[in-house]
Image (spheres, rainbow, N blue to C red):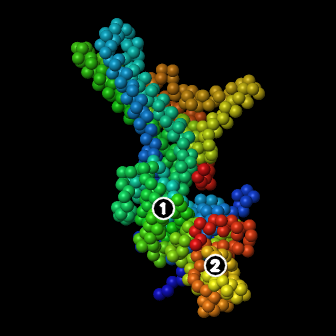
Amino acid sequence: MNSQSDAVPEHFDSQRSAPAAMSETRPFYWSVRRELWENRSIYVAPLAAAGVYLFGFLISLIRLPQKMRALSTLDPAHQHAAVTMPYEFAAGLIMATTLIVAVFYCLDALHGERRDRSILFWKSLPVSDMTTVLSKAMIPVVVVQLVAFAVTFATQWIMLMLSSAVLLGGGLNVPTLWTQVSLFQMSLMLFGHLLIMHGLWYAPVYAWLLLVSAWARRAAFLWAVLPWLTIFAVEKVAFNTSHFAAMLGQHFAGGGQAVASEGMSPVIGVQFSSLSSPGFWIGLAIAAIFLAGAVRVRRYQGPI
Amino acid sequence: MTVAALPIIEARGLRKAFGGTVALDGIDLRIDEGRIVGLIGPNGAGKTTALNAILGLTPYQGELKVLGRDPWTERDRLMRDVSFIADVAVLPRWIKVSQVLEYVAGVHPRFDRGKAEGFLAKTSIRSGSKVRELSKGMVTQLHLAVVMAIDARLLVLDEPTLGLDILYRKQFYDSLLSDYFDRSRTIVVATHQVEEVQHVLTDLMFIDRGRIVFNCSMDEFEMRYVEVMVRPEQVEAARALGPMHERQALGRSILMFDLALNHGDRQRLAALGEVRTPGIADLFVAVLGDKPGKAGEARGNYEGVAR
């Protein structure tokens, strides 16, 4: 706080009755909250997806006792897959929803404030462009993922409770269901997957979208997508190869190892081992460059 | 103990060009503490660009210090001591009144939420309303309530009452003067609605084509400039005294004199007709009158408010 810049106009500050002390993190905290006030879709969309899914699941419960009886004849591996399938599907649906929410959030985050001229209000407050951009990056990287986790956890919990109630009513074996659906382990894996894959591995995408939304005057989505399509097309036409697309594809599959074909099944160790791959850190470095660009661009921007 | 007034804003050779268009053409100015300065000029004269430079919203060439800081590199720090209302509708439409107060209280160390709520209690704005549900006048009241609850040194207003009805406009300046302004604060206001700020200002600056073309205090303005509605038979005699400007209204000639130049005293002019202090708009036209292209434009802009 006591940097040189604070010392220069001392004769101005010395006149104040009360020194204005404020923690540096407070503007950041309030800026993140502000984003949640503005973008309620961050939690409304996954909640709606969960609601729709639960409704469908409720109807499917009619066939549950019958299904459980049929399952008992199968071998354990197939049994496990068949029982946990609806739970993984719920997680997948909510994840897909939050991914879409995150992408559209980023595209609008620094564009909407210029479109409605409110940037002039935000810039009239003592909040730096860096704080603003970082608080907006915080949403897709952390907040959206935490919301996705909480909603998925609650949904799966409700599913398990409903199933247990139905099985109890039919006089069937509930403990079998509970041993198959290990909610705790599943949630731990989901948590790692959301924060590491959807948060950090995808961070360069969010950062790129934020940069475009800070810079583009209109059609932010086109500007966000076109450069990459162009590179892909030129490479294809010129060399008839698609290394670029393959490289991106590999990155967003978590360096090609994090997400195995079993979907949610990889053990949590795989998530963390992906952190040691250079691709992960290169991605974060690129994200940092894009965010620095967004901070710089926002400084020059006014209403459009 | 008398303390020399501090320069709140100090600019030397302030320049800004957008491509080939020069918006600010080497402005020198100094605004001291405790003043209410009106920045008056036609559209495109550079008012908003000058204010944006002062607020750290746009880069510039030349020297500029606001409260001793460089606004472009220290905007966020500076905004603790500077408040700013840029025309009317810059509050986001989705936000609730209570959220505006909560957010500003969260990020602004000098904001007094209780004070803002006190101002709002005097209006018909409810804290649960969203900005999009408020009328334009109410949005301005809300913004003003927030700004007046910030203990700032400098308040910058850029067309703060544009598009508001007469009641809200009057209320706006009345509240500013009675509930906000004191000798430790400074206000800079850029506006076209010169009639209603004339009694508010302590200083007057005319800006035209990126230059400050006129700069005086309102005290000086009242001492120095007079307007005489000359009786028809004395028009020639009045013209002989070398008025700075002449116009016709209601079939009478109205001549404006600069007492410092004309050496004419008030008594002599009073003999020619009815003497009064001119409106800012009329002085503006008179000052820019020697530039045919620009004067016509200026006249067009101010016709609506000229008597």
- Residue B240: % across, % down: 72, 87
Horizontal side of B92 relative to A164 (left or right) equals right
| Residue at the right extreme, as displayed | A238
Which residue appears at 37% of the width and 8% of the height?
A74
Q: Residue at x 64, y 73 (%)?
A: B284
- Mark 2: which amino acid? Arg
| Residue A183 image position (x, y, % from top left) | 35, 26
Crowding around mark 2 (Cα neighbors within 10 Å: few <14, some 14 to 19, many 20+) is few
Closer-to-camera residue (B182/A67): B182
Q: Residue furthest top?
A: A73
Q: Secondary structure at mark 2?
A: strand
Compared to A211, does B67 lie above or below? Answer: below
What residue is shown at x 34% (from left), y 8% (from top)? Answer: A70
Q: Quadrant of residue A253?
A: top right
Closer-to-camera residue (A55/A209): A55
Relative height, residue A286 to residue A89 (above, below): below
Q: Which residue is tagged 1?
A: B165
Q: Mark 1 falls within which chain?
A: B
Q: Residue A286, percent across and down?
A: 61, 41
Q: Nearer the viewer, residue B6 or B167?
A: B167
**Left/right of residue B139 with respect to residue A119 in the rendered view:** left
Residue under label 2:
B252
SS label for mark 1: loop
Quarter the C terminus of chain B occupies: bottom right
